Amino acid sequence: MNALAATNRNFRLASRLLGLDSKLEKSLLIPFREIKVECTIPKDDGTLATFVGFRIQHDNARGPMKGGIRYHPEVEPDEVNALAQLMTWKTAVANIPYGGAKGGIGCDPAELSVSELERLTRVFTQKIHDLIGVQTDVPAPDMGTGPQTMAWILDEYSKFHGHSPAVVTGKPIDLGGSLGRDAATGRGVLFATEALLKEHGKSVSGQRFVIQGFGNVGSWAAQLISEKGGIVVAVSDVTGAIKNSNGLDIPSLLKHSREHRGVKGFHGGDAIDPNSILVEDCDVLVPAALGGVINRENANEIKAKFIVEAANHPTDPDADEILKKRGVVILPDIFANSGGVTVSYFEWVQNIQGFMWDEEKVNNELRTYMTKGFKDVKEMCQTHNCDLRMGAFTLAVNRVARATVLRGWEA
């Protein structure tokens, strides 16, 4: 089942638990607006190249729409639609005043020079500047984009609308980016894991962790978990996987990964088959890479008691059912990886106020939001007698539905 089908399925299950009528259910699913634009730029060699840019704006009942911009050669419209919808539910679970959006450009950033990427970003911004905005739709980085991309969008947008640092988040610090944003998703994973383990009478200290994915989210999660006394026994990335039953030395691994562009060849552990990483013996499994990695083929072999979904949609619905029957507790992606969008919200707030916070305040506020978010999800689980995934979805759908009805928008 693809990401869109799985998201729609979870939405419909939540909708039934909440007793929403079919008209309201339909209006919550249909995107607010789908934008497609042609972006033609001169390349460095003087030839012209044309790319397709797009933006799906899903829902704005609770506030401006929010979501990443990705540069990737294979942009699947269904997947982008699912991710835009997922952002609506994620921001609602986190209780931040946003709706969901997603977008990007169908291109391979590795094949474009920096100046070509800048021209492409500026042309894309020129085409959509009237459809995004501080109180309308606030983009952020995603696959293939980063702080520099956001800086170009901010500059181009400001030519039309005056200096507007709050129009994008994930900016460089020098242009109004927030301290703590780089670590935010990984730190949110730590806070979410702490809340989950506390519920079961445990703490991070002494628990054995396996982390699939050692990019931004996975590496920060590993570092912060190990600082709290968690034992990270195995990690993997695109280059390979390594394991040490006594616990990997995470600071040394981070250094190795930076120097060698991956975990492969690290001497503080044994190389293992990357495909076996999910079924290694541990207490907590953290998938922090791609979607759909936990499926009916491997669900019965997973040994973890807890799964914390740091990636988007890592567990497919078949695996969900198998793991539920086996008593494995899954902390769903729409809550577990919401630390990034929560600190993006803090960045937006700081830009609007024109008053920047120190990193300690950012991290303390994030802990408050993640802890309260878990409590809210648990209350929904008890009200509707459901698991954490349905608890998070019912919480999100209920908040968006209430805002929609209060605004008089229901069909």
Image (cartoon, grey):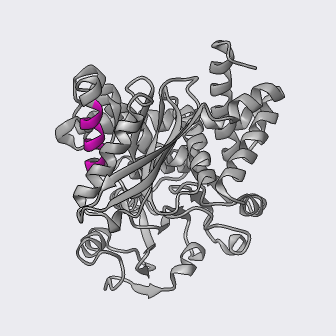
Between 11 and 390, the one lying in front of the other is: 11
Expressed as whole percent of the image width and height from the top left, the position of residue 310 reads 50, 55
The number of callouts visible is: 0
Magenta span has 154? yes
Magenta stretch bounds:
148-157
**Residue 265 in the image: above or below residue 406:** below
Please give the name of the residue rendered at 34% of the width and 68% of the height, measured from the top-left corner: 111
- In this rendering, would 81 be left or right of 52? right
- In this rendering, would 394 be left or right of 251? right
**Residue 6 in the image: above or below residue 97:** below
Would you identify the image quadrant in which residue 155 lies? top left
Q: Residue furthest left?
A: 174
Please give the name of the residue rendered at 71% of the width and 43% of the height, measured from the top-left corner: 390
Expressed as whole percent of the image width and height from the top left, the position of residue 364 reads 34, 35
Please give the name of the residue rendered at 50% of the width and 23% of the height, measured from the top-left corner: 63
Q: Residue furthest front?
A: 47
Please give the name of the residue rendered at 41% of the width and 44% of the height, measured from the top-left corner: 340
Q: Is residue 102 visible?
A: yes
Between 238 and 156, the one lying in front of the other is: 156
- In this rendering, would 92 be left or right of 187? right
Where does the C terminus fall, quadrant-wise? top right
Q: Is residue 243 visible?
A: no
Would you identify the image quadrant in which residue 158 lies? top left
Magenta span has 336? no
Expressed as whole percent of the image width and height from the top left, the position of residue 14 reads 75, 38
Where does the N terminus fall, quadrant-wise? bottom right
- In this rendering, would 276 be left or right of 339? right
**Residue 273 in the image: above or below residue 342:** below
For the stretch drawn in magenta, the main secondary structure is helix
**Residue 218 in the image: above or below residue 33:** below
